[in-house]
Amino acid sequence: MAQIKLKSEVTGSVWKLLKKPGEQVEAGEEIMLIESMKMEIPVASEVAARVEQILVAEGDPVQEGQQVATLAT
């Protein structure tokens, strides 16, 4: 089983969590939305996987490159 670390591409805050640990996601499916400069930036899985951990909560500030979730394939 491989682990995939999802990272934020922007500095902002977690606007909405769309998935929970244990849920399956498909390639391209959004895990959460990051709000940055009034824009919603999705954090999505690149492969079909299971959400292992969500490392942030709604409203949390995030930095560019910060790990926000872990997936397991």
Image (tube, rainbow, N blue to C red):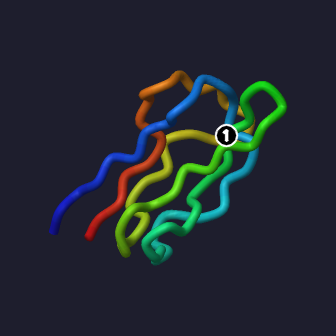
Q: Which of the 4 quarters of the picture holds residue 7?
A: top left
Residue 1 in percent (x, y) is at 15, 69
How packed mark 1 is, by other alpha carbons closer than 10 Å (few <14, some 14-19, many 20 or more), is many
Query: Along the horizontal axis of the image, is 42 left or right of 47?
Result: right
Q: Residue at x 74, y 36 (%)?
A: 35
Residue 44 in percent (x, y) is at 51, 57
Residue 55 in percent (x, y) is at 48, 42
Q: Residue at x 23, y 57 (%)?
A: 3
Query: Along the horizontal axis of the image, is 58 left or right of 28?
Result: right
- The foreground one among 39 and 12 is 39
- Position of residue 18 relative to residue 32, above or below, is below
- The foreground one among 1 and 10 is 10
- Position of residue 19 relative to residue 55, above or below, is below
Q: Quadrant of the C terminus?
A: bottom left
Q: Residue at x 56, y 59 (%)?
A: 31
Query: How many marks on residues?
Result: 1
- The foreground one among 68 and 29 is 29
- What residue did someone put label 1 on? 34
Q: Which of the 4 quarters of the picture holds residue 61?
A: top right
Q: Residue furthest right?
A: 38
Residue 15 in percent (x, y) is at 75, 42
Query: Along the horizontal axis of the image, is 29 left or right of 36?
Result: left
- The foreground one among 20 and 5 is 5
Q: Callout 1: helix, strand or loop?
A: strand
Q: Amino acid at mark 1?
A: Ile
